[in-house]
Amino acid sequence: MRAEKGRTTGPACRICRTAITPSGRGRPPLYCSRSCQAKAYRRRRRPVPPESEQPAASDAQGRRRRQIAEALWRIAAERGLHAASLREVAAEAGGSLRAVQYHFTTKHQLLVDALHLLHEENERIARSRVDHDPADPRALLRAVLEEFLPVDAQRATALRVFAAYYARSLTDPALAEVFLPAEQPLERLVADLIGAAQAAGRTAPGLDAWREADLLVSGAVGLGGDVLHGRRGLDDVRRTLDYHLDRLFAG
């Protein structure tokens, strides 16, 4: 078989376009190897979204995945994760069920990936807000703890979504691994801030930075939940946090 200018002059594999030599018996082969035949099978099995919803590039795919995740967050915040079926998420995102399945093949994959995206989004926004002077460790620690409180619509929605995930993670080990990572990054961040203040002689003597961080993070999260439920007011919760920070920085 002879190729000219990148073209084959006979049958070509439907996957890799390699020229195929006809055997002369039966129907001509469609693929050059079992590997290409397997690739063709996988492509047929994978859902394909309508042409109008097919991403043009990786950045477009990322944006569409983000839109679908945001739709899941809105449903979780308003009605809980049990209401977030793929069909409901598709309707909330303004797309088709096939388009959602193209990006997330199962609901569980959507839940896990959307939780990863929520962590990344919260960290990005928090970093843009926490801009206090590092030379003032108390103000910096106060700003970090305030991220656990529903002081605006974005943080209130995020706390509601995390509450929905918390309930689900109690019976889903894969979600629990993402929701409560073993390395405890939030507690470690607060412990590092307290430790740095200790090293500078800015705290009360004899503190265990890790134990203090554990109490502050769990307390701020619980108080934020109380504000969401209307059990406490935001000003009252802030006074409680200030009380504990004054105790830490009494030195």
Image (tube, grey):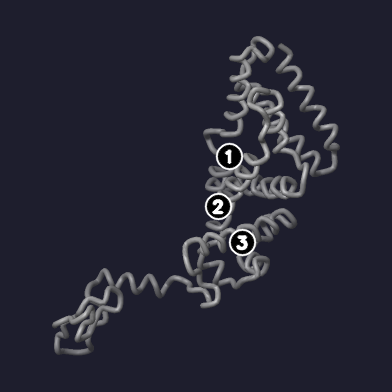
How packed mark 1 is, by other alpha carbons closer than 10 Å (few <14, some 14-19, many 20 or more), is few
| Quadrant position of residue 22 | bottom left
User: Is 25 above or below relative to 31?
Assistant: below
Question: Which residue position holds label 2?
Answer: 112
For discs 2 and 3, the disc positioned in front in the rendered view:
3
For discs 3 and 1, the disc positioned in front in the rendered view:
3
How packed mark 2 is, by other alpha carbons closer than 10 Å (few <14, some 14-19, many 20 or more), is some
Please name whichever residue, 142 or 103, is drawn nearer the observer in this view of the structure: 142
How packed mark 3 is, by other alpha carbons closer than 10 Å (few <14, some 14-19, many 20 or more), is some
Percent x, y of residue 207:
64, 14
Report how far apart the C-alphas of labels 3 and 1 lie in the structure. Answer: 24 Å
Q: Are marks 3 and 1 in contact (CB under 8 Å)?
A: no
Q: Give the left or right position of residue 47, taking residue 142 as reference.
A: left
Question: Which residue position holds label 1?
Answer: 180
The amino acid pointed to by label 1 is Leu
Q: Are marks 2 and 1 in contact (CB under 8 Å)?
A: no
The amino acid pointed to by label 2 is Val
Report how far apart the C-alphas of labels 2 and 3 lie in the structure. Answer: 15 Å
Q: Reading the chain from its start, which is encountered first: label 3 or label 1?
A: 3
The amino acid pointed to by label 3 is Gln
| Quadrant position of residue 41 | bottom left
Question: Which residue position holds label 3?
Answer: 67
User: Is 49 above or below relative to 247?
Assistant: below
Residue drawn at the location 14% of the way across and 85% of the way down: 23
| Quadrant position of residue 193 | top right
Identify the element where label 3 is drawn: helix
Report how far apart the C-alphas of labels 2 and 1 lie in the structure. Answer: 12 Å
Identify the element where label 2 is drawn: helix
Please name whichever residue, 141 or 169, is drawn nearer the observer in this view of the structure: 141
